[in-house]
């Protein structure tokens, strides 16, 4: 089912919003910036259960930047990947399992390249 109504406008996101995506297969949590929110059609799938908005994120890979929804990102990543946390501006990542790597190029917490899997 289509996530957005035809012609639906994206809702701009103030700077600082981020999404943390957990990947149990690779034992990591990747943090990416949210650049907009996309309205969700009633009854359509969304990466954040019950949310009326789907996050649109930026993987700013050098030479291959990707703008996509989190839902599409999860479809292309390992089975079991999930939205670990929605981070409001100034909030800290929490609840990361022991032994998992945090991939956050904006904080220097992990590799800055190769973030978007399956791209």
Image (tube, rainbow, N blue to C red):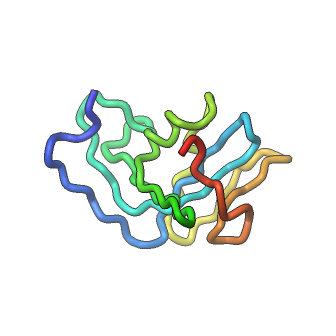
Which residue appears at 43% of the width and 36% of the height?
A: 49
Q: Is residue 92 above or below residue 84?
A: below
The reply to whether residue 48 is in sight is: no
Q: At which x and y percent is residue 63? A: 53, 64
- Screen quadrant of the N terminus: top left
Q: Residue 102, located in which quarter of the rendered image?
A: bottom right
Which residue appears at 64% of the width and 53% of the height?
A: 30
Q: At which x and y percent is residue 41? A: 24, 36
Q: Is residue 35 above or below residue 117?
A: below
Q: Is residue 77 above or below residue 7?
A: above
Which residue appears at 26% of the width and 47% of the height?
A: 39
The answer to whether 96 appears left or right of 9 in the picture is right
Q: At which x and y percent is residue 13? A: 36, 65
Disc count in the image? 0
The answer to whether 97 appears left or right of 89 in the picture is right
Q: Residue 112, located in which quarter of the rendered image?
A: bottom right
Q: At which x and y percent is residue 53? A: 33, 47
């Amino acid at each position: 089912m289509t996530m957005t109504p035809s012609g639906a406008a994206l809702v701009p996101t103030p700077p600082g919003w981020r999404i943390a995506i957990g990947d149990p297969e690779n034992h990591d949590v990747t943090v990416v910036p949210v650049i907009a929110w996309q309205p969700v059609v009633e009854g359509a799938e969304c990466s954040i259960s019950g949310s009326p908005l789907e996050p649109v994120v930026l993987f700013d890979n050098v030479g291959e930047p990707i703008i996509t929804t989190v839902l599409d990102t999860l479809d292309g990543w390992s089975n079991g990947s999930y939205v670990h946390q929605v981070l409001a501006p100034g909030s800290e990542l929490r609840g990361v399992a022991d032994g998992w790597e945090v991939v956050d190029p904006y904080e220097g917490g992990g590799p800055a390249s190769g973030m978007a899997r399956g791209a």
